[in-house]
Amino acid sequence: MKIAVLTSSRADYGIYLPLLKALKNDSFFQLSIIAFGTHLSKKHGFTLNQILADGFNVPIQVDTLPDDDTPLAISNAMGKTLINFSKVWEENNFDLVFCLGDRFEMFAACASGVPFNVKLAHIHGGEQTLGAIDDAFRHAITHMSMYHFTTTEIYKNRVIELKGNDKNVYNVGALSIENLKTLPLLSIEEFNNKFHIDLSKPSILITFHSETVSYDKNELYITEIIAALSEIKNYQLIITMPNMDTMGNMIREKLNTFIDNHTDAFGVESFGTIGYLSCMKHCSFMLGNTSSGFVEASYFPKYVINLGERQTGRIVTENILNCSIEHHQIAKAIQHFSTIKLPSSIPIYGEGVTSEKIIQTIKLSA
């Protein structure tokens, strides 16, 4: 069975990893990885190299990068992605193509395949992020897809509601949980040797992406966040850079200026999958608005201060505290964590056998 996997960023590649390994090791499948988006961007760490270093071939690489992070540039990039992917679909015939999530470039790649009757299998459908334009893209991909692999029963039911029927809709849990159960995460010493950051010190893992629904407020938001970071004492700050979203470059520049002027702050473009999850394991808590604060953080579990509205609509588990983007409120949220005790586990995203469930489903349907 000829399978293609669409990956546009470090984030979706890290989630796909257990499935990619399972597909590669199963002789029933002929796997092709299609890399595009920020994988091919030097500014964003050229993470295509991580895919290759993990032992995968990437026979198809598609230039889809926007020239800037303005709404016009993002819109133009969507058109560029549609055009460049039309050649991919014309020249290749796959039995099934996996897509994941909700990025604008993922939407455009999928939409380009509709006239070619490309059969799509969508992972992470049915979720909501009301503070990001990704919400519309995710639900559109659902309508374009033949198979649907959701991470919870709630999200499965939302896909059924969107489609109007339950055909080929499966709750298989999250691939990220399988990652966490199977990947050899780094010890504090190994992490320090590789990244020169000592996680034996109290540390905050910070990621803030722009709010693309209210993108005009992002300069105010990052100003408030930096004001809060400037007041934090007794923690080192580990800051990973934002996605290629509207006004993402502005956020990146302001964070880098802050990092340059604070010896206890570290800026990282990409840790890679193992590095990022290891940092999450050993950090004191997380701060920002990344989806990993909802799924992966539930595994340990890890405290999360979720900022603003970008992730509004996702399931909020008891390790997550929603907080407005105002520096005094952020300081109060940090203090709040000293007064609560986390449960030993929050098992809402499955048991870590997601890739096996997906592959069994596909084989039975082939």
Image (cartoon, rainbow, N blue to C red):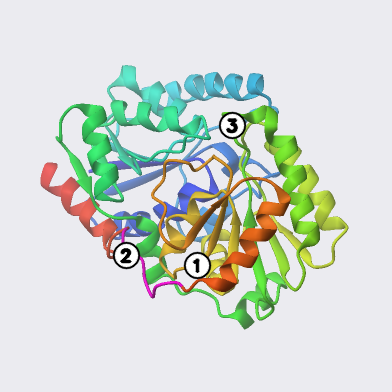
Looking at the image, the residue that sits furthest to the left is 364
Mark 1 nearby-residue class (10 Å; few <14, some 14–19, many ≥20): many
Residue at image location 57% in from the left, 48% down from the top: 289
Above or below: residue 243 compared with residue 92? below
The span shown in magenta is 342-348
Above or below: residue 120 compared with residue 292? above
Q: Which residue is nearer to you in this view: 96 or 183?
A: 183
Three-letter code for the amino acid on which mark 1 is drawn: Lys
Q: x, y percentage for residue 353?
A: 26, 63
Left or right of 173, for residue 225: right
Q: Which residue is nearer to you in this view: 317 or 160?
A: 317
Among the two numbered marks 2 and 3 on one chain, the one whose residue lies closer to the N terminus: 3
Disc 3 marks which residue? Answer: 212
Three-letter code for the amino acid on which mark 3 is drawn: Thr
Residue at image location 47% in from the left, 50% down from the top: 13
Q: Secondary structure at mark 3?
A: loop
Residue 226 can be seen, yes or no: yes
Quadrant of residue 270 in the image? bottom right
Tell me the tag on residue 302: 1
Left or right of 53, for residue 258: right
Disc 2 marks which residue? Answer: 347
Residue at image location 41% in from the left, 22% down from the top: 112
